[in-house]
Image (spheres, rainbow, N blue to C red):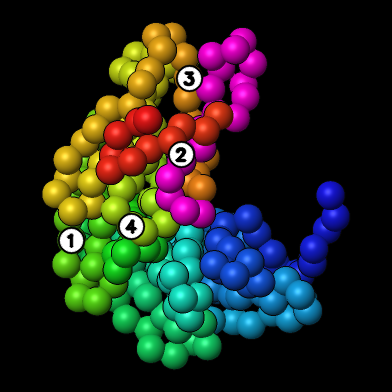
Amino acid sequence: MRRVQFADGLTEIGGISPDGRYLSFVDGGHGHGDLSVMDLATGQKQQVAKGASHKANVKVGAELSVFSPDGKQLAYGWHGPPDNDQLRIINVDGTGERTLFKKDHPMWIQTHGWAGGHVLIMYGRRDSKETQILVVSAADGSVQTLKTLQGDQPQVKLSPDGSWVAVAVSHPGSSLENTLSLISTADGREVPLPKQAGLRQWVQGWTPDGKALLFTSTRDGRNNLYGLRVENGKAL
């Protein structure tokens, strides 16, 4: 293990570009700030979206971000008053910013992936325990609701081609057991994946070819990493 680069204001809130060279991050901490990109080869940092504020009564700034499949754009949550988030897209050089998704009530957004022409987000009202898993078209901002849940937030991972969302959902009343499923972004169809009672399983990601889902599980008495081959939404 080695430290790749270090920069003042670097936080863990962000993503890696498809070619592995750039890191997007929130500059300034506090859970939100200016959106920046760092070249991991040279350490050079560039601000992409500015305007963050950390004043007690005016909290404004970027949150979670993901790169587009070609690495030329970023989709990110932008937090602004009155306690309201928006989904925005911007070119990595700071041009072409536009808003894809917003509501007129206090809400939160988490950005979780960009593939197949759409951005995967989780969304919820701040006065509710309901969470919605949505895909938003990067072209026109049209929205498709894939799943609505109550209680704890699920874990979600978008497949490399954007066809499927892997979801880990905790069982109501149990912090030690959850289920895995795949949801089609084309029609919202949900396919349960094999499970074992009493186990906690968390989605970690997909292989680059999208043919296997990686997850951690306690099925061997320890928390180990496993791979499950999938094809057309079905476990093999």
**Mark seen at residue 162:** 4
Closer to viewer: mark 4 or mark 1: 4
**Residue at point 57% right, 57% down?**
13
Q: Earlier in the sequence, mark 3 or mark 1?
A: 1
Residue 17, by quadrant, is: bottom right
Q: Earlier in the sequence, mark 4 or mark 3?
A: 4
**Mark seen at residue 143:** 1
Residue 213 colored in magenta in the image: yes
**Mark seen at residue 200:** 3
Marks 1/2: CA distance? 25 Å
Marks 3/2: CA distance? 16 Å
Residue at the spot of label 2: 213
- Nearest to the observer: residue 233 or residue 64: 233
Please tell me whether mark 4 sits on a helix, a strand or a loop: loop
**Does 149 sit above or below residue 3?**
above
Q: Are marks 4 and 3 in contact (CB under 8 Å)?
A: no
Residue 58, by quadrant, is: bottom left
Q: Earlier in the sequence, mark 4 or mark 1?
A: 1
Marks 4/2: CA distance? 14 Å
Instruction: Name the amino acid, label 1.
Output: Val
Q: Position of residue 147 (x, y in %)?
A: 21, 41
**Does 34 sit above or below residue 13?**
below
Highlighted range, magenta: 208-225
Instruction: Name the amino acid, label 2.
Output: Leu
